[in-house]
Image: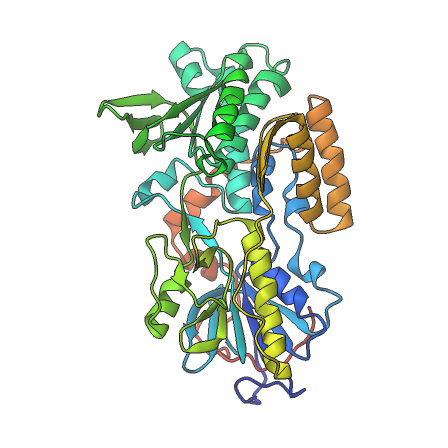
């Protein structure tokens, strides 16, 4: 990837501008980079995917409402007019605070990026609470790959049920279990119920899709606990109304190909036979948080989030800013607005430092509320003192989410797909392949070296390990 033999001093560019490295292309990283559009800096945005993901709408990709392109535009396209920003594909494997370098790798190629200012917005992944073996049979909902795999599993279950002749096998195939009664789990369970009871009702000849079971499990005693008891109870009643079985106080103890084992509050263990299991419970911050903690002396919590200073920097390292799901500060929720506001705050702090101005003061999160859809025309919204449910909350949800979809084209097609899905019965994105369903598991069995062996290019490590090209294209 980098072949120039010249060496640039760490923290500077040929233009003499300070280097800002941004890790992650999610809300925190992308909005931080955009906020530095007019700053006299050279930005390198490093991310392990080539797109910016609007994660709150992944469940709509999984259930055939939206295409992945509508919620995951290419990062290069988003930043194409920002001449001080460069996008680099690679997974960050190491951060050296003393040397002020970030190391990323992609398919056996390693690149080292020196920095003057660092914004770490690597986000969080799925947490199985120490039971990572569950991931084989219960995919999470954190990436485009996850959503496409789940789309294949969900629609594939109906197809296989149409072929089955054993009633017990049909029941297993038409049982869908969603683990986690937070916003993601509630929205996913609601949309699967819509699929079974409305969208697919006339598409099959042998099975009756309206007989499908959709089960929402959670070890907690409430649905949407962060929304409060009143809205949580309303959400639970609406879920029951559309055919979702809500089972609370139920802890998952095992998952396999044919079903899931659950331990109830009374200690009794029972088994649910289900072909499709979806994990929407718990998150774990990027392992980069622990790297930063070891070098800076900061603490990390059980979810891997690193404690930051009130200005979102690390102790003793004012040049390192941690934003979004990776940082722990004042028990802030893991929502997009925290990452967006944190990214913009970090960008402003960098500009102030470069201009020699006083810091703005500690980071203050402005809570813009929380929303979750339950079914078409029904949602709950908790915005300040305003607590809403039903159609008005659903319309508010549509407007807010539409505003955060990046790009006019994506907004337009999203609206068209919402019209098709919510006013009609169709789902525009029902294509699913075996590669989507089994690709993740196959790659895991082949091992990490498989992709490198098939990618071509350098294999003996003779490629450069320093970012010396100074390319400024985005």
Q: Nearer the viewer, residue 280 or 51?
A: 280
Specify the quadrant of the image occupied by residue 265.
top left
Q: Nearer the viewer, residue 153 or 52?
A: 52
**Quarter of the image with the N terminus in it:** bottom right
Specify the quadrant of the image occupied by residue 474.
bottom right
> x and y percent of residue 312 in the render?
49, 66
> x and y percent of residue 128 in the render?
35, 43
Residue visible at 59% across and 65% down?
345
Q: Work out whether residue 8 can be spotted.
A: yes
Residue visible at 59% across and 50% down?
53
Q: Work out whether residue 166 can be spotted.
A: no
383 with respect to 111 (left or right): right
Q: Nearer the viewer, residue 408 or 108?
A: 408
**Residue found at the far left of this picture:** 267
Reply above or below: 116 against 36: below
Residue visible at 55% across and 79% down?
467
């Amino acid at each position: 990837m980098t072949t120039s033999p010249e060496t640039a001093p760490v923290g500077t560019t040929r233009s003499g501008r300070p280097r800002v490295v941004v890790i992650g292309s999610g809300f925190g990283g992308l909005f931080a980079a955009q906020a530095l559009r007019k700053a006299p800096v050279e930005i390198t945005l490093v991310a392990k995917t080539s797109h910016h993901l609007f994660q709150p709408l992944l469940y709509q990709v999984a259930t055939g409402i939206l295409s992945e392109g509508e919620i995951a535009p290419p990062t290069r396209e988003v930043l194409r007019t920002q001449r001080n920003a460069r996008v680099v594909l690679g997974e960050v494997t190491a951060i050296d605070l003393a040397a002020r370098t970030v190391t990323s790798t992609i398919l056996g190629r390693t690149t080292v990026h020196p920095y003057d200012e660092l914004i770490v917005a690597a986000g969080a992944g799925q947490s199985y609470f120490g039971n990572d073996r569950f991931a084989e049979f219960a995919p999470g909902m954190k990436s485009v790959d996850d959503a496409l795999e789940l789309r294949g599993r969900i629609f594939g279950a109906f197809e296989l049920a149409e072929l089955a002749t054993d009633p017990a096998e049909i029941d297993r195939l038409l049982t869908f279990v969603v683990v986690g009664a937070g916003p993601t789990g509630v929205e996913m369970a609601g949309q699967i119920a819509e699929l079974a009871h409305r969208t697919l009702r006339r598409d099959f000849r042998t099975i009756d899709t309206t007989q499908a079971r959709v089960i929402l499990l959670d070890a907690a005693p409430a649905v949407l606990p962060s929304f409060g008891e009143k809205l949580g109870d309303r959400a639970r009643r609406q879920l029951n109304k559309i055919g979702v079985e809500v089972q609370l106080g139920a802890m998952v103890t095992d998952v396999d190909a044919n079903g899931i084992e659950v331990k109830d509050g009374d200690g009794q263990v029972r088994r649910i036979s289900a072909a499709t299991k979806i994990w929407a419970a718990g998150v774990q911050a990027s392992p980069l948080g622990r790297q930063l903690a070891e070098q800076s002396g900061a603490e990390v919590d059980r979810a891997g989030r690193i404690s930051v200073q009130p200005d979102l920097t690390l102790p003793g390292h004012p040049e390192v800013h941690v934003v979004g799901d990776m940082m722990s500060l004042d028990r802030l929720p893991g929502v997009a607005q925290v990452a967006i506001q944190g990214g913009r705050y970090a960008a402003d702090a960098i500009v102030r430092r470069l201009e020699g101005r006083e810091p703005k003061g500690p980071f203050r999160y402005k809570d813009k509320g929380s929303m979750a859809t339950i079914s078409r025309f029904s949602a709950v919204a908790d915005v300040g003192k305003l607590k809403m449910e039903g159609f008005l909350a659903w319309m508010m949800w549509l407007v807010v989410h539409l505003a955060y979809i990046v790009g006019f084209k994506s907004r337009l097609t999203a609206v068209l797909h919402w019209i098709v899905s919510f006013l009609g019965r169709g789902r525009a994105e029902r294509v699913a392949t075996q590669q989507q369903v089994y690709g993740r598991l196959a790659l895991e069995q082949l091992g990490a070296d498989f992709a490198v062996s098939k990618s071509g290019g350098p294999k003996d490590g003779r490629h450069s390990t320093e970012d010396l090209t100074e390319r400024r294209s985005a």
